[in-house]
Image (cartoon, rainbow, N blue to C red):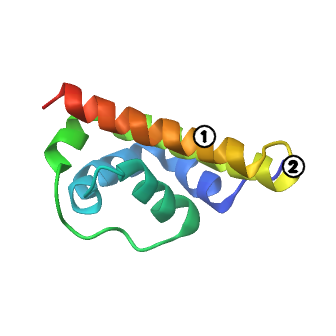
Amino acid sequence: MEKSHFHKILFPNIKVFASIFADKLQMWLTSNDLLTKLHAWIVLGDEAPSLSIDKKHFLELLSAEDLTYRFYLWEENVNLLKTGYLAPTDLMDKKNYFIELAKNMNKIHE
């Protein structure tokens, strides 16, 4: 399977990405649907969300490496969806799981 644009750029430069990402993360993350916003920003190319809330808590919850792994999983899921190995409802279930995980982790750290 051919590697995506995201995979080609990110994985050879993971340490550089992690350090840049750690600095910029506070500006990008803003709501309880953080993982949805991150998915939209990374996978769909949407605009990064504006400054808002819960940045400090989220930085404590997920490292750049953890987020990178989640992005990789999303990318693989999207590829599986395109090839017919996953149904749209499967992808929605995974998205809801990640959203709930982020919300629950946030509650633990409050």
Residue 50: x %, y % from top left: 25, 70
Q: Residue at x 49, y 55 (%)?
A: 39
Q: Residue at x 40, y 33 (%)?
A: 101
Residue 63: image location, x then y, percent: 33, 35
> Which residue type carries mark 1?
Asp
Q: Residue furthest top?
A: 108
* Quadrant of the frame with the C terminus: top left
Residue 35 shows up from this direction: yes
Query: Which residue is nearer to you in this view: 75 or 30?
Result: 30
Residue 49 position within the rendered picture, expressed as x and y whole percent measured from the top left: 32, 68
Position of residue 69 relative to residue 92, above or below, is: above
Circle 1 sits in a helix, a strand or a loop, which is it?
helix
Q: In the rendered image, which residue does mark 1 sit on?
A: 93
Residue 26 picture location, percent across and down: 21, 55
Comes first in the chain, label 1 or label 2: 2
Q: Dot 1 surroundings within 10 Å: few (below 14), some, or many (20 or more)?
A: few
Kind of residue indicated by mark 2: Gly
Residue 11 vs residue 51, the one in the foreground: 51
Quick check: 98 left or right of 82?
left
Count of marks overlaid on the render? 2
Q: Please indicate, yes or no, whether residue 62 appears anywhere in the rendered image.
A: no
Mark 2: which secondary structure? Answer: loop
Q: Which residue is mark 2?
A: 84
Residue located 29% across and 49% down the image? 32
- Residue sitting nearer the eye, 37 or 63: 37
Left or right of residue 11, residue 24 in this image: left
Point 81% across, 53% down: residue: 2
Q: CA distance from mark 1 to mark 2?
A: 16 Å
Q: Quadrant of residue 44?
A: bottom right
Decide: marks 1, 2 in contact (CB < 8 A)?
A: no
